[in-house]
Amino acid sequence: MNRSEFLKICGVLGIGMPFLSHCTSNQAKAILKPGEKVIIIGAGVAGMSAAYLLKKRGVEVTVLEASSTYGGRIESDKDLADFTISLGAEWLHTSDPVLESIVDDTSIDLDVKTTAYDFELDYCLDAATGKKMNLKDMQLSESDLRFTNSSWMDFYETYILPTIKDSIQYNQIVKSIDYTGDLVTIETGKEVFKAQRVIVTVPVTILKDGDISFNPPLPKKKKEAIENLNLYSGCKCFIAFKEAFYPTMVRVQDDGEGPTRVYFDAAYAKSSTDNILGLLAVGNLAKPYLELQDPERIHFILKELDDIFDGQATPNYLKHVFKNWSEDPFAKGTYYPDFSPKTFSGVKTMSRPVEDKLFFAGDLYTDGSNGWSMVHVAAESAKKTVEKLVGKR
Ligand SMILES: Cc1cc2nc3c(=O)[nH]c(=O)nc-3n(C[C@H](O)[C@H](O)[C@H](O)COP(=O)(O)OP(=O)(O)OC[C@H]3O[C@@H](n4cnc5c(N)ncnc54)[C@H](O)[C@@H]3O)c2cc1C
């Protein structure tokens, strides 16, 4: 089952209907007592969103981030082009007003625009057959949007980060969490931190590999869920060309079920003079790119494009940037577009707190009602976790 089919079934079954989710949230009482502190592990979308919402409610928050910067899997590059290159998440996979919901402040005037593909004009070239395909055959719909002259990172930097930037501590790689006492003790190898409640937002691969030890160990159900969840290996590459010789999308391989190998016009919806072609390769289809190192890798990519576009890639090449997500020590993968019931049950299990001390938020720690493995879902899960802690406004 792919993402669109899954969401259709959710709609039919009423999973995620606003009425149902509001009912459950309204019944929840605030867990956090006055004066209690919260430590958030990870400054990706879920960690930043949770910190922002808690700070807005007057809660003292510290975010411990392993890497030297914020963003996690919305990491960006600002050097290759005259617009922000999204090395991780790029599309907004919903037309719901989620950006307003993330900012959660009606006094703030949001200035973020999105662009849908033009399904009449834009097309995908199938590299194997040389035929034009409709973008809808690439599992894209009117609700798969591109940020207009913006990106997920630009959005977070503009609207969320200013509120929380002083609360983030970088290069703090959390190694252990002890929740035996009234205060949860967190060790990073550099320092020890204590708080009444902790929100864990690290990718599931970090928990899977045991990079963080828990005392007492996580409950059996959580361990099983972690076992059943994963992130696909993968990478992204962005290449600057003198001329744009390519259409909106080029399918190299994609079965619509998760693993993908696709080139796309990364300057689509940007007022840019740069011609930037993106490559997204995920799962077993990423193998050819992950196995090579530059300069062999970029030669391989240019040859692949030369074969499709009659030798136009190499003479037009200017420069490129490559991101190997499988080798990122704090991500260890990309996303998990597996919409099986086992995964659905796993993400739901992961979203539940342990002893009202350990809380979870992130793209695979959700109630599953709106899918998973997407930025807006990670943000939404943070909001639901914050509501568990401080109650719903
Ligand atoms: C290549 C790629 C393409 C994608 N495309 C899209 C897309 O187009 N649209 C979309 O909606 N989604 C997309 N996604 C998925 C999306 O990026 C994620 O679902 C979302 O960003 C996850 O946010 P998160 O906060 O749950 O996790 P993360 O962003 O992974 O944040 C977790 C944070 O925890 C930190 N951390 C890890 N270990 C430790 C530790 N031990 N101690 C302290 N901190 C730690 C990490 O450094 C990171 O900052 C894509 C992802 C990738 C990789």
Image (tube, rainbow, N blue to C red):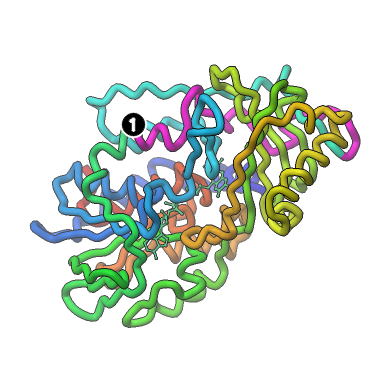
**Location of residue 319 by image quarter:** top right
Q: Is residue 75 left or right of residue 385?
A: right
Looking at the picture, how far across and down is residue 244, in whole percent? 72, 22
- Eyeballing the image, is 315 above or below 160? above
Q: Is residue 169 left or right of residue 138?
A: left
Measuring 44% from the left and 79% from the top, which residue is drawn there?
220
As for residue 75 lying within the magenta part, the answer is: no
Could one spot residue 20 in this view of the protein?
A: no
- Of residues 235 and 261, the one drawn nearer to the viewer in this rendering: 235
For the residue carrying disc 1, how many other residues have a C-alpha within 10 Å: few (<14), some (14-19), or many (20+)? few
- Of residues 26 and 33, the one drawn nearer to the viewer in this rendering: 33
Measuring 38% from the left and 49% from the top, which residue is drawn there?
69
Measuring 21% from the left and 42% from the top, which residue is drawn there?
393
- Of residues 97 and 47, the one drawn nearer to the viewer in this rendering: 47
How many numbered marks appear? 1
Q: Residue furthest left?
A: 35
As for residue 148 lying within the magenta part, the answer is: yes
Looking at the picture, how far across and down is residue 125, in whole percent? 81, 31
Q: Is residue 195 left or right of residue 46?
A: left
Could one spot residue 3 in this view of the protein?
A: yes
Q: Is mark 1 within 8 Å of ligand 1?
A: no
Measuring 35% from the left and 31% from the top, which residue is drawn there?
100
Range drawn in magenta: 128-157
Looking at the picture, how far across and down is residue 293, in whole percent? 69, 54
- Eyeballing the image, is 263 above or below 229? above
- Of residues 227 and 51, the one drawn nearer to the viewer in this rendering: 51
From the image, tell me which residue sits under label 1: 158
Q: Is residue 37 left or right of residue 70?
A: left
Looking at the picture, how far across and down is residue 224, in whole percent? 51, 75
Q: Secondary structure at mark 1?
A: helix
- The amino acid on which the numbered mark 1 sits, given as a three-letter code, is Thr
